[in-house]
């Protein structure tokens, strides 16, 4: 090869790099065999404690769910996971069609007109939705109503600062409000009055942004039904492992007239000269590689493979399966809530509020409760006072289809002991 | 029809009394390719000279649109919403974009056809 | 060959999957929730059996080109082989099964991995600290610019402009604008490198940063990088490194030594985490000491072998992503770095440069090279001559390559080269692959000169031919403005769109 190029060594090709910058070597150990590599990596994995699915009652944005084997069987196909962004449509129909199906599934689930091809996570989805509202309304304040996931709000603040958008807490929008953002159910599992918040936003000329749980949408009125303008959320529960918080997938869907401000990729149908249907990246002229500094978002890489997992998951479940797991979580959480509230000194933190499968209890000595459970192999409630000082002693518990009846008994027994 | 004048940014303007009609030039539409969308302002909005008033998009490109004149928008070509391709097929006729009630006089630095041709030729390379 | 949509394959008669029952007394939603809180109509999800699902997605998979089957000479994208060991590592239950809100004591191995990955990335790019939070390259760019903004703010300096070369990736100006900066373009000189004269004229007390890719998007090393750094720093601005092209010089030189203050890396380019059809990736950002206070929180800290997450960072720009970033991708990148070692990474970059120059040399006879070599890890050719003489465009060449089982190079980028064809072969392709790619280019160019019409009709062997994007875009826009009912961007039952 060197001969073809007409040089004597690779160094002859590096002549443009000033000598003063050249390194002798990297300050890193030498490479390892595959066997040694995985042994070292596994040693790190083994230093972590993995709680059993059935004994995990901690949620807070990431949940243990049953993941059908079909999900990994599809996402581990190298034709999917080693493919690039589908810029060359003819060579990427598999990815493009899968994304098109994902977009349709999310639009159905949220009852919104159009979904994009995915975003990074629930937090950046909230932030991107707020940016859309800012661009659409020309107003520079967003209102966060209720207990929206604290990390989502932190990300929203960081995004907002770059564009001069103020983030305030409250549910009383005014002339300056670009959007009212709420979470349904919220970070504590509480149900909010989504239709009222949406109306309040609209009365003030602001957009309503609903951050929703995709599984519980099988039970709850979807954003499209109460007229929200943008629906966003975290899709981890749709077939993705917890994996210390990522990679997961953010979803975002909106009303038809806002689609041109939707960030990220969109896939649409198109036809070739022979009339065959195919799929292409659509409305690309909105995006950063064409609009550069005038684009509404800088997003380029998204979370396609996670969106594929979500599509396989939802297709596997079908409408009945999804409703079934949502109902099981609902029933078990209500059963557990009743039993926990009966424990001496324990009470529901918001007894007047409704919930689905995550709820908040006020308990004596919360940190020792959590430690006690850990000793018995149970990942117990999440101490939310870490983010909300007024919630001292409040733990949230969550139940899904993986927490079987015996696991609930084990939890209650462990607490009673 | 009044004489057509041009800008360096490839817009054209004609004047009928105190009303100007504006669009993009044949050269501009050929550079842009098949137009698929125009984002246009509402009638009644006031525009300053050189003010950006919208965006024109093809599949692979997007350009801001600038008003060559100052004034108030009297009409927007509604046909373009459904048939953006008119900008390609008839840029100086049915593909017009805005009619503007002029606030003052036409700017003096607009180009005539010969001058514009030179500009277009220079940008083609 | 095409595949129906899952929605079109759906059969109402399919038995739903068997799932656990609640096995406990408890209410149903309708028993306790007011009716207006309940969904009125179930979502119209498809109903397919598992065998139907597996066949559907297997057929879709077969419609894709991928690194596992095809050469992907996509300039600027570093499509190298994704070691399968990475996948095995990320799937280890000790990583995949971790809840992000477990106590720190129970995730020491995960934190140690993040800490070691941070140290390794610091060594590769020559910086003080790295944040692993950003989920992708563009996210990393934006994170870095937020830190730079915070740095200037902390010094009570009001700097409002970010300089971006005209050859830069589109994400650069977009990220700068989203960070609140005005974007000022710097021109390339005729040799394809940044024009120092133009840079000098645009640098001022308003300049917050210069964003630079080195080697630049033409695959050329910015020889005057040390002078550039001096000029930028002399005005008090910061130098930002777009790491898209880091694969060119691992172990050969380091952005930190060149004077860059902030550096983003794409783990899905340089460090072999798979692209996944467009993500997930990861876009860590490395910074020099003066930017460390502004890193997103939390950072991973290590003291006496014990690892903690540090949230108490008063000058931090805050949080840019939930939890700790795309942890699964971090595991993959760490596994790769461990297997390669310092020696392997250096060799990878040297081989990448060798591959690019070899391929450049092979195709030089057929395609115009607007800039003099040698190149680094990629090169940009131009089909400009073929376009003027034979009416064959870069796009036609791209599509003709698809028919020859090669994925297409990046075309029409960078914008400063007409009919650009940007080729990045990477170090993981064999000489035989490069030879056959060059032979394909030769064949296509010969055809362009004799029978250009044939090329306009390619690709023929792909599942679909060239798709009419213009018609699609016009239909979408008609839908968006309410003048048509078929959304094009999603499936609708035929009765709903009639």
Image (cartoon, coloured by chain):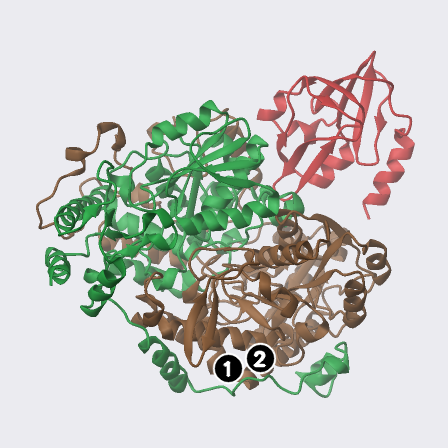
Chain colours: A green, B red, C brown
Name the residue nearer the viewer: A166 or C191: A166
Whether residue A117 is situated above or below residue C270 in the rendered picture: above
Q: Among all residues in the image, which is located at the extreme top?
A: B17
| Chain under callout 2 | C
Q: Are marks 1 and 2 in contact (CB under 8 Å)?
A: yes
In the picture, residue C397 is in which quadrant?
bottom right
Name the residue nearer the viewer: C411 or C383: C411
Residue that mark 2 sits on: C348
Q: Residue C63: x and y, percent?
A: 42, 56
Residue that mark 1 sits on: C340
Dot 1 surroundings within 10 Å: few (below 14), some, or many (20 or more)? Answer: many
Q: Is residue C267 left or right of residue B5?
A: left
Q: Residue C198: x and y, percent?
A: 84, 57
The residue located at (41%, 57%) in the rendering is A305
Q: Is residue B19 left or right of residue A306?
A: right
Name the residue nearer the viewer: A210 or C235: C235
Q: Which mark is in front, 1 or 2?
A: 1
In the picture, residue A38 is in which quadrant?
bottom left
Check disc 2 and report its element: helix, strand or loop: helix
Q: Residue B5: x and y, percent?
A: 85, 26
């Amino acid at each position: 090869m060197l001969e073809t190029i007409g040089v004597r060594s690779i160094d002859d090709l590096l002549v443009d790099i000033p000598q003063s910058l050249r390194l002798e070597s990297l300050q890193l150990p030498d490479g390892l065999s595959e066997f040694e590599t995985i042994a070292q990596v596994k040693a790190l994995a083994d230093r972590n404690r993995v709680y059993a699915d059935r004994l995990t009652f901690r949620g807070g944005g990431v949940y243990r769910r049953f993941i059908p084997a079909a999900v990994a069987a599809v996402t581990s196909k190298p034709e999917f996971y080693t493919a690039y962004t589908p810029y060359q449509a003819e060579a990427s129909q598999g990815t493009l069609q899968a994304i098109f199906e994902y977009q349709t599934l999310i639009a159905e689930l949220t009852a919104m007109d159009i979904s994009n091809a995915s975003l990074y996570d629930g937090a950046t989805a909230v932030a991107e939705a707020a940016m859309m509202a800012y661009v659409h309304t020309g107003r520079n304040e967003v209102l966060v109503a209720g207990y929206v996931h604290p990390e989502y709000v932190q990300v929203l603040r960081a995004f907002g600062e770059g564009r001069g958008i103020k983030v305030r807490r409250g549910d009383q929008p005014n002339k300056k409000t670009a959007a009212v953002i709420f979470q349904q159910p919220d970070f504590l599992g509480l149900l909010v009055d989504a239709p009222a918040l949406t109306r309040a936003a609209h009365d003030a000329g602001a957009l309503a942004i609903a951050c929703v749980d995709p599984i519980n949408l099988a039970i709850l009125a979807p954003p499209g039904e109460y007229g929200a303008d943008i629906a966003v959320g975290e899709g981890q529960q749709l077939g993705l492992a917890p994996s210390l918080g990522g990679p997961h997938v953010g979803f975002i869907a909106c009303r038809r007239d806002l689609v041109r401000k939707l960030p990220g990729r969109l896939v649409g149908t198109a036809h070739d000269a022979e009339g065959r249907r195919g799929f292409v990246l659509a409305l690309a002229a909105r995006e950063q590689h064409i609009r550069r500094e005038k684009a509404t978002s800088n997003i380029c890489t998204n979370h396609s493979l996670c969106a594929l997992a979500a599509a396989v998951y939802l297709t596997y479940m079908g409408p009945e399966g999804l409703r079934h797991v949502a109902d099981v979580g609902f029933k078990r959480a209500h059963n557990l809530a009743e039993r926990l509230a009966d424990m001496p000194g324990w009470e529901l933190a918001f007894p007047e509020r409704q919930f689905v499968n995550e709820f908040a209890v006020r308990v004596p000595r919360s940190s020792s409760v959590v430690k006690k459970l850990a000793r018995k192999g149970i990942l117990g409630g999440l101490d939310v006072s870490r983010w909300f000082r007024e919630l001292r002693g409040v733990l949230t518990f969550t139940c899904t289809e993986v927490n079987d009846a015996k696991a609930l008994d084990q939890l209650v027994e462990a607490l009673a002991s | 029809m009044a004489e057509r004048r041009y800008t360096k940014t490839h817009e054209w303007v004609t004047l009928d009394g105190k009303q100007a009609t504006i669009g993009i030039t044949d050269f501009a539409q050929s550079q842009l390719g098949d137009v698929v969308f125009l984002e246009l302002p509402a009638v009644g909005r006031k525009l300053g000279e050189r003010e950006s008033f919208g965006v024109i998009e093809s599949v692979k490109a997007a350009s801001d649109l600038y008003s060559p004149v100052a004034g108030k928008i009297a009409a927007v070509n509604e046909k373009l919403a459904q048939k953006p391709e008119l900008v390609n097929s008839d840029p100086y006729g049915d593909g017009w974009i805005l009619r503007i009630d002029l606030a003052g006089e036409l700017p003096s630095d607009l180009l005539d056809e010969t001058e514009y041709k030179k500009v277009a030729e220079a940008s083609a390379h | 060959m095409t595949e129906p949509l899952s929605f079109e394959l759906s059969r109402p008669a399919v038995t739903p999957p068997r799932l656990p029952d609640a096995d406990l007394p408890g209410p149903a939603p309708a028993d306790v929730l007011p009716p207006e809180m309940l969904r009125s109509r179930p979502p119209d999800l498809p109903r397919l059996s598992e065998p139907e699902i597996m066949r559907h997605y297997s057929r879709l998979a077969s419609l894709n080109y991928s690194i596992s089957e095809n050469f992907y000479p996509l300039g600027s994208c570093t499509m190298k082989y994704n070691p399968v060991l990475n996948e095995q590592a990320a799937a280890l239950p000790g990583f995949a099964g971790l809840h992000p809100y477990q106590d720190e004591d129970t995730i020491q191995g995960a934190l140690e991995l993040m800490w070691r990955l941070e140290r390794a990335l610091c060594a590769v790019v020559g910086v003080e600290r790295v944040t692993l939070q950003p989920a992708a390259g563009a996210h990393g760019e934006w994170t870095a610019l937020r830190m730079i903004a915070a740095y200037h703010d902390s010094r009570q300096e009001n700097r409002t402009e970010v300089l971006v070369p005209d050859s830069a990736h589109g994400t650069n100006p977009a990220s700068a604008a989203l960070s609140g900066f005005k974007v000022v373009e710097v021109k390339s000189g005729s040799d394809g490198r940044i024009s120092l004269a133009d840079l000098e004229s645009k640098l001022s007390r308003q300049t917050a940063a210069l964003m630079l890719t080195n080697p630049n998007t033409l695959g050329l090393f910015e020889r005057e990088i040390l002078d550039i750094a001096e000029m930028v720093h002399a005005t008090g601005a910061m130098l930002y490194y777009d790491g898209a092209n880091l694969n060119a010089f691992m172990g050969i030189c380091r952005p930190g030594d060149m004077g860059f203050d902030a550096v983003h890396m794409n783990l899905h380019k340089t460090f072999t985490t798979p692209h996944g059809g467009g993500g997930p990736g990861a876009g860590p950002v490395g910074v020099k000491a003066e930017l460390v206070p502004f890193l997103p929180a939390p950072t991973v800290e290590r003291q006496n072998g014990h690892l903690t997450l540090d949230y108490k960072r008063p000058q931090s720009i805050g949080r840019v992503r939930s939890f700790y970033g795309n942890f699964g991708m971090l595991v993959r990148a760490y596994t790769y770095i461990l297997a390669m070692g310092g020696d392997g990474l250096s060799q990878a970059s040297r081989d990448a440069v060798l591959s690019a120059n070899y391929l450049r040399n092979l195709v030089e006879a057929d395609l115009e090279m607007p800039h003099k070599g040698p190149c680094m890890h990629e090169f940009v050719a131009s089909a400009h001559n073929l376009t003027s003489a034979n009416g064959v465009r870069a796009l036609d060449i791209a599509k003709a390559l698809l028919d020859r089982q090669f994925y297409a190079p990046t075309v029409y980028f960078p914008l400063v080269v007409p009919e650009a064809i940007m080729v990045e072969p990477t170090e993981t392709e064999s000489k035989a692959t490069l030879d056959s790619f060059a032979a394909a280019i030769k064949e296509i160019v010969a055809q362009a000169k004799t029978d250009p019409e044939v090329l306009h009709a390619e690709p023929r062997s792909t599942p679909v031919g060239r798709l009419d994007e213009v018609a699609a875009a016009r239909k979408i826009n008609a839908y968006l403005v309410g003048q048509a009912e078929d959304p094009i961007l999603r499936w609708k039952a035929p009765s709903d769109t009639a």
